[in-house]
Amino acid sequence: MEIQYKLTEEDVVAFNLYHVKHSKVGKNSLQWQRYISPLIFLLFAYFLSVFTEMPKGPLFAAFGITAVLWVIFYPKYFYFHITRQVRKMLKEGKNEGLVGEHLMKMNKAGITDKTSVGETAVQWTGVKQLREDAEYFYVYTSTVSAYIIPKRDVYSADGFKSYVRKRMLA
C-alpha cells in the first residue's frame, strides 16, 4: 500500500491536541491543574481572612467565583496553551521532515516514510497502536510519537484501517 500525503502545521497541532486529550498523563495534568488551583484560591482566601481583618463574606465570594470560573474555563485555556506552544516550536526550526510532502509505503515488512530530507522506517513489530479521530489516522511507534496520516489523503479509510490492523496482528 502506498499513500502520498502532505502534512501541515495544522496537522501537527491536531496530533498534539489529540495526544494530550487521550493520554493518561495529559488527562491527569488537566485534572490536577483544573481542580487543585481553585482549592489553592480558596485556601488563600481562608488565610487572608484569618491573618487580616478583611471580611470573610466578600473575600470568599470573590475567590469562590474565581474558583468556579477557573474550573469552567481552564480546559479551553489548557488546550489553547498547548496549541500555542506547538506552533512556537514549529516556528523555531526547520521542519521539512515533519511538515511537507510524504510518501508512505507499507508492505509485509513494515512502514517506510520518505520526505524531502530523509526516510524513516519501522517494522510492524514497532507499531504500537493505530488510533484515529474524524480527520486523521495516528500510527503510534512509541507512546509519544506517531505517523500522522490525514484521512483527506487516504483513498479508503476502511481499507487503510483494516490493512494496518492486519499487519499489526501478523
Image (cartoon, rainbow, N blue to C red):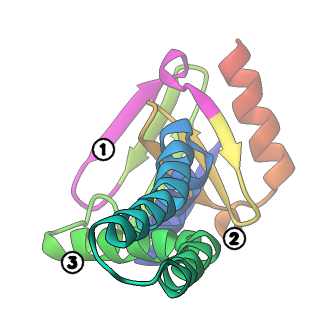
Q: Are marks 3 and 2 in contact (CB under 8 Å)?
A: no
Q: In the rendering, which numbered label is found on residue 66? A: none
Q: Are marks 2 and 1 in contact (CB under 8 Å)?
A: no
Q: Is residue 129 left or right of residue 10?
A: right
Magenta stretch bounds: 115-129
Residue 65: horizontal and vertical position, in percent? 59, 82
Callout 3: helix, strand or loop?
helix
Q: Amino acid at mark 3?
A: Lys
Q: How many marks?
A: 3
* Magenta residue check for 120: yes
In the picture as drawn, the residue positioned furthest to the left comes out as 93
Please give the residue where the numbered disc 1 appears in the rendered image.
Answer: 119
Q: Residue at x 33, y 39 (%)?
A: 120
State how far apart marks 3 and 1 are (Cα): 22 Å
Please give the residue where the numbered disc 2 appears in the rendered image.
Answer: 152
Q: Quadrant of residue 61?
A: bottom right
Is residue 31 shown above or below 106? Answer: below
State how far apart marks 2 and 1 are (Cα): 22 Å
Q: Nearer the viewer, mark 3 or mark 2?
A: 3
Residue 76: horizontal and vertical position, in percent? 56, 76
Q: Which comes before the other along the chain, label 3 or label 1?
A: 3
Q: Is residue 104 left or right of residue 119?
A: right
Q: Nearer the viewer, mark 3 or mark 1?
A: 3
Quadrant including the C terminus: top right
Is residue 156 shown above or below 105? Answer: below
* Magenta residue check for 45: no
Please give the residue where the numbered disc 3 appears in the rendered image.
Answer: 91
Q: Quadrant of residue 166?
A: top right
